[in-house]
Image (spheres, coloured by chain):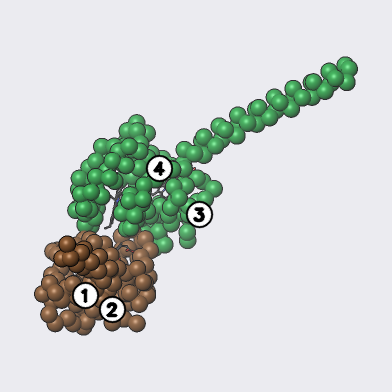
Chain colours: A green, B brown
Amino acid sequence: MTNSHRRLAFDLTVWAVSLCAGIVLIAHEAMADGHRYRADNARWKAECGSCHLAYPPQLLPAPAWRSIMAGLDKHFGTDASLDPAAAAEIGTFLQNNAGSSRRVGAQSLRITETAWFRHEHDEVPGAAWQRPSIKSAANCAACHRTAEEGDFRERNIRIPR
Amino acid sequence: MRSIGLALGLLAVVPAFAGTPNGILEGYRAAGAATVSAPRGEQLFTSRHGSDWSCSSCHTGNPLARGRHATTGKDIAPLAPAANAERFTDPARVEKWFRRNCNDVLGRACSVQEKADVLAYLMSLR
């Protein structure tokens, strides 16, 4: 092998390795992104984020959001009614960013009662949900410390005592 | 022309004034709450009225302190203006929450008199 051949082989190897690493990185990011929800709307964040975390629209299918928006005056035991202009804007935002029924299909209007949610949380000990520091499974931010930014990735989870 | 100018001037002044706790209280007075009572407001705020919740269930018995939503556990900033300068500065926001929370706690809307009393109570806290 001449020097220049050796050089070429080395270059090719470096390229191949970087390319593989690149693909792995991209694939990893895409998977991680599955639990990072980026859609944003100021009115949604303010109105739907005042009593609890503004749950990402991707976590329920469009028909469930439609039912929720139609019943805000009797919303899980509380009055969350909105003026018509705000309700229209938020309703559209939720519809446009809703999850697919196949992935997050819901029998009830609760994210926490979907098969998807139960599956993701099957390793959480049953008693943890009742701790005073958590109060409710719907209190995502108690364990997902970056949930406010739409980030539910595993590395940012800590179950409080 | 001058009266239009005057009317526009008034329109500009009223919302600016309404956007303070005092301005909102004056609004309730003008709407019929002639004698306002902070002790009566405190009574309404801290008692239950037939449902599981009182106002204190989420805002605590000390509205100068941070509250916590009774079901969801979410943190709620203090309600008394002395502890939170953003409170009672946006009339639409104030009416929205009175509507919702009175409905949850009393099972009906609060009267102008009741809103005035509660606001007077919250403004009396230092």
Q: Residue at x 50, y 51 (%)?
A: A157
Q: Are marks 1 and 3 in contact (CB under 8 Å)?
A: no
Query: Between marks 3 and 4, how big is the CA–CA gap?
Result: 24 Å
Q: Are marks 2 and 1 in contact (CB under 8 Å)?
A: yes
Say whether residue B45 is visible: no
Looking at this view, name the residue that lies furthest to the top.
Answer: A1
Residue at the spot of label 4: A39
Q: Earlier in the sequence, mark 3 or mark 4?
A: 4
Query: Along the line of sight, which residue is nearer the eye, A10 or A135?
Result: A10
Q: Amino acid at mark 1?
A: Leu
Q: Chain of mark 4?
A: A
Where is residue B100? Give x, y as percent: 21, 61
Q: Nearer the viewer, mark 1 or mark 3?
A: 1
Where is residue A155? Give x, y as percent: 54, 48
Residue at the spot of label 1: B25
Query: Between marks 2 and 1, how big is the CA–CA gap?
Result: 10 Å
Work out whether disc 1 and disc 4 sit on a shared chain: no
Looking at this view, name the residue that lies furthest to the left.
Answer: B32
Looking at the rendering, in which quadrant would you find the C terminus of chain B?
bottom left
Q: Chain of mark 1?
A: B
- Under circle 4, the secondary element is loop
Residue at the spot of label 2: B123
- Under circle 2, the secondary element is helix
Q: Chain of mark 3?
A: A
Q: Nearer the viewer, mark 3 or mark 2?
A: 2
- Whether A101 is drawn above or below B20: the answer is above
Work out whether disc 1 and disc 3 sit on a shared chain: no
Q: Residue at x 20, y 49 (%)?
A: A84
Q: Amino acid at mark 2?
A: Met
- Under circle 1, the secondary element is helix
Residue at the spot of label 3: A158
Query: Between marks 2 and 4, how big is the CA–CA gap?
Result: 39 Å
